[in-house]
Image (tube, grey):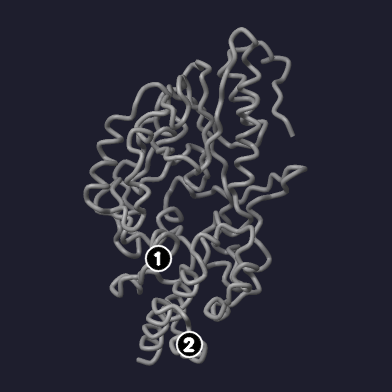
């Protein structure tokens, strides 16, 4: 599927043509910002975050500061003038329709289907090709698609473009769409008329801050990733601190708690917009409905490869999923898991997993 411009906009303003092409590709929102103006205040906040050590084990966040501050550098695209920011919504079902089978409800909504990177990257590549096609032999246009593969502060650029505003939980909230979106960018040397930023609209609401089960928000707009359940279950490779395990609750991979309570997500139901070549990328994989948490404890390398193939859940790693499963079983309070946990505590090859299983056993034996 290639983006196309209706005849009515074939010769329209270039920015309008790009917006139309992005929507034709299935993006729910699109906005444009200058790429040659560095992030200043945003980088100050980022530096404060790093200086406080709130990145935890994500040491890659400490690197490439210059590249994070601006897009018109050789690390991204030298000579860039504009950045096209896009958002694609993923499904949220009403509470009464939320799935209950297997481990599916323990996985964050964005990760229940196929790995979204492939879907987004294909569409971003097509959008970049469309932008390049707006150049000529005399005035060629360069464009580079970005999707989680370069050190880009995508929420900051999305906010600057007016794609949405940053909520108190640090996520981009797109008016009329909500925060349950995935972001991508196309950086280009084509000069496009930018959109205006949107003023923050949270007002006095602090529902997202109060909903965090581990109290990971130091202040509005300031997240200590070391306490965040999404970080602990996905990026953190060491043992989950004992004092935070209860807060992990029923989360095997990721956490949606600060989003599900947000008023801007109310009424934003499931989207079904399959394309001919990709299908619906966020349709939950059938494997999650038939898999039990106890099975996650005993996955060998082959079983883990089959379980995680083509899924974002692969990010946690085999030991990470087993560690998380043990903690969730301990929090669930069901003594029927004791036999599986005892086997794991005695025989799992990873000491971190054995420790989590022992913690769960102690919790279930009270």
Q: Is residue 340 left or right of residue 210?
A: right
Question: In what element is the residue under mark 2?
Answer: helix
| Disc 1 residue crowd, few under 14, some 14–19, many 20+, Cα 10 Å | some
Foreground residue, 84 or 351? 351
- Residue in the image at 51% along x and 38% along y: 176
Marker disc for residue 214 = none
- Residue 259 vs 362, above or below: the answer is above
Q: Position of residue 225 (x, y in %)?
A: 33, 56
Quadrant into which the C terminus falls? bottom left
Q: Which residue is mark 2?
A: 347
| Disc 2 residue crowd, few under 14, some 14–19, many 20+, Cα 10 Å | few
Quadrant into which the N terminus falls? top right
Q: Position of residue 60 (x, y in %)?
A: 37, 49
Q: Is residue 129 left or right of residue 36?
A: right
Q: Position of residue 59 (x, y in %)?
A: 34, 52
Task: Tally the numbered discs.
Answer: 2
- Residue in the image at 47% along x and 22% along y: 80
- Residue 346 vs 15, above or below: the answer is below
Foreground residue, 79 or 228? 79
Query: Residue 66 occupies which quadrant of the picture?
Result: top left
- Residue in the image at 37% along x and 43% along y: 167
The residues tagged by marks 1 and 2 sit, at their Cα atoms, a distance apart of 20 Å
Q: Earlier in the sequence, mark 1 or mark 2?
A: 1
Question: In what element is the residue under mark 1?
Answer: loop
- Residue in the image at 53% along x and 41% along y: 147
Q: Position of residue 291 (x, y in %)?
A: 62, 74
Q: Which residue is mark 1?
A: 237
Name the outermost residue toward the top.
138
Foreground residue, 28 or 253? 253
Foreground residue, 149 or 293? 149
């Amino acid at each position: 599927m290639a983006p196309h411009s209706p005849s009515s906009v074939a010769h329209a303003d270039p920015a309008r043509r790009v917006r139309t092409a992005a929507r034709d590709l299935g993006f729910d929102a699109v906005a444009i910002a200058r790429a040659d103006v560095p992030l200043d205040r945003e980088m100050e906040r980022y530096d404060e975050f790093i200086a406080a050590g709130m990145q935890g084990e994500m040491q890659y966040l400490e690197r490439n500061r210059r590249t994070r501050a601006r897009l018109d550098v050789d690390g991204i695209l030298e000579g860039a003038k504009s950045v096209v920011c896009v958002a694609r919504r993923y499904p949220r079902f009403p509470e009464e329709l939320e799935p209950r089978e297997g481990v599916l409800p323990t996985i964050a909504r964005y990760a229940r289907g196929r790995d979204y990177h492939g879907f987004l990257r294909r569409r971003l590549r097509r959008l970049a090709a469309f932008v390049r096609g707006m150049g000529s032999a005399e005035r060629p246009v360069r464009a580079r698609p970005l999707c989680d593969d370069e050190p880009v502060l995508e929420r900051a650029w999305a906010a600057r473009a007016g794609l949405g505003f940053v909520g108190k939980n640090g996520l981009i909230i797109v008016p009329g769409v909500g925060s349950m979106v995935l972001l991508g960018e196309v950086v280009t040397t084509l000069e496009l008329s930018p959109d205006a930023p949107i003023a923050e609209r949270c007002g006095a609401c602090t529902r997202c801050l109060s909903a965090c089960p581990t109290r990971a928000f130091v202040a509005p707009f300031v997240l200590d990733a070391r306490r965040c359940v999404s970080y602990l279950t996905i990026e953190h490779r060491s043992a989950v601190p004992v004092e935070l395990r209860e807060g992990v609750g029923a989360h095997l991979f990721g956490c949606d708690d600060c989003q599900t309570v947000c008023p801007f997500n109310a009424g934003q139901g499931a989207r079904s917009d399959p394309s001919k070549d990709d299908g619906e990328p966020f349709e939950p994989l059938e494997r999650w409905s038939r898999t039990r948490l106890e099975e996650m404890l005993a996955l060998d390398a082959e079983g883990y490869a089959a379980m995680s193939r083509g899924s974002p859940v692969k990010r946690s790693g085999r030991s990470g999923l087993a560690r998380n499963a043990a903690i969730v079983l301990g929090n669930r309070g069901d003594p029927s898991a004791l036999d599986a946990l005892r086997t794991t505590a005695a025989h799992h090859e990873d000491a971190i997993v054995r420790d989590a299983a022992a913690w769960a056993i102690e919790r279930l034996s009270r």
